[in-house]
Image: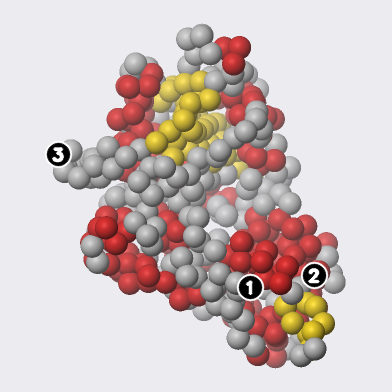
Amino acid sequence: MPLDHDTPSGETIDLYAREAVASDKAGQDLPWLLYLQGGPGFGANRFIRKEAWLGRALEEYRVLLLDQRGTGHSTPANRQTLPLRGGPAEQADYLSHFRADSIVRDCEAIRPQVTGGAPWTVLGQSFGGFCAVAYLSTAPEGLDTALVTGGLPSLDAHADDVYRAAYPRVARKVAAHYARYPQDVERARRIADHLLTHEVVLPNGYRFTVEAFQSLGLMLGGGDGSHRLHHLLEDAFVRTPGGPALSDAFQEQAQALLSFAGHPLYALVHEAIYGQDARPTAWSAERVRNEFPGFDAAKTLAGDEPLLFTGETIHPWMFDCDPALRPLRETAELLAARTDWTPLYDPARLAANEVPVAAAVYHDDMYVHTAHSLETARAIRGLRTWVTDEFEHDGVRAGGPRVLDRLIALARDEV
């Protein structure tokens, strides 16, 4: 693919996708379903069986699992490969082509080769849903149906608006966690106090600060996240000759959860997915956090309030703490300062939409603001929503067959 679709004769990048088809239908002429993974920055799922939503999809589709540009096998972008572009300025310019608009144009370039020109169904999870809405905005002729799970973006919100809505949502998820596991209030405070008074470096070289510990709240947006966080906290300390210390087992688990080594684009372009005008994102999550003093760990520990975890937010300190991100700090700064982001969505075209669209909107979704999603749902002609609190943001994984079945039925007006 061209790196820049507006310059088709310029530099190219490789894209990779794999096909999945039921073995008993391999010889049949089936319609195609394109799966767009959440993120940004994650390659498509590597399925080993008919798990999550895949089994339901394979009942009637051939499925294309696309590694979006920069992820998986699609010319991966990370601290090892990006220096091939040049210095930080060249790297930032390169990464400006890794948003939903470029991903949609990749899909449209692929589609004729895969389907023979026929439109296909797109299933977009989370950021993949953002891409699906961009698809409806720019190339609806390529779509037979659009299915979105937990991924209806605001059409015009700045990153500041997104995070200003997010912090109260995260606080509610934290409160619900402590209501379920009240013993975790003291455990979290104890760990935070240890990190404020000790310098801790994880085995991979990650500087484990109290802000990094708070970022483990990202787990609370998944269906089993509260339970996973609880089990992580309960084994945090061991007794040593030098006194209590964070256990090797706890540090190993925290390291796996905190490292961006496998998905650095998630950190690099996360705020850029909200850039649509001349205003820079300018480390929006960090700036907006200052409006919510309840997330200040030092102030919390000076009193007797429960420690607040944070959610899906990217901060400049991550590029100091994480060895996988440290070489990319200046690149991230340049992306945060960028002022030439172009619009990703076309409200007029969405208002005239003729493609069947169905979306699962998870009530009080920690990752995507429900009010923003419903506003967008109303702005897309013919879109049908399924608003549910049965699942969290990862509902397409946890309840995959039922979720996908419901959306297919909604799109076909069979509900």
Do the CB atoms of the residues marked 3 and 1 lie less than 8 Å apart?
A: no
Q: Identify the residue at image location x=83%, y=65%.
A: 181
Instruction: Kindly report the distance in space between the C-alpha atoms of the residues bearing marks 1 and 2.
Output: 15 Å
Q: Amino acid at mark 3?
A: Ser
Q: Amino acid at mark 1?
A: Phe
Q: Is residue 196 above or below residue 362?
A: below
* Residue 91, position as x, y percentages in the image: 28, 61
Mark 2 or mark 3, which is nearer the start of the sequence? 3
Q: Residue furthest front?
A: 241
Residue 292 can be seen in this image: no
Tag shown at residue 235 = 2
Q: Identify the residue at image location x=65%, y=28%.
A: 50
Label 2: state its secondary structure.
loop
Tag shown at residue 254 = none
* Residue 126, position as x, y percentages in the image: 53, 45
Q: Which residue is mark 3?
A: 9
Q: Identify the residue at image location x=53%, y=13%.
A: 26
Q: Residues within 10 Å of mark 1 (few under 14, many from 20)?
A: some
Mark 1 or mark 3, which is nearer the start of the sequence? 3
Label 1: state its secondary structure.
helix
Q: Which residue is mark 1?
A: 213
Is residue 209 or residue 313 the one in the foreground?
209
State which quarter of the image contains the N terminus: top left
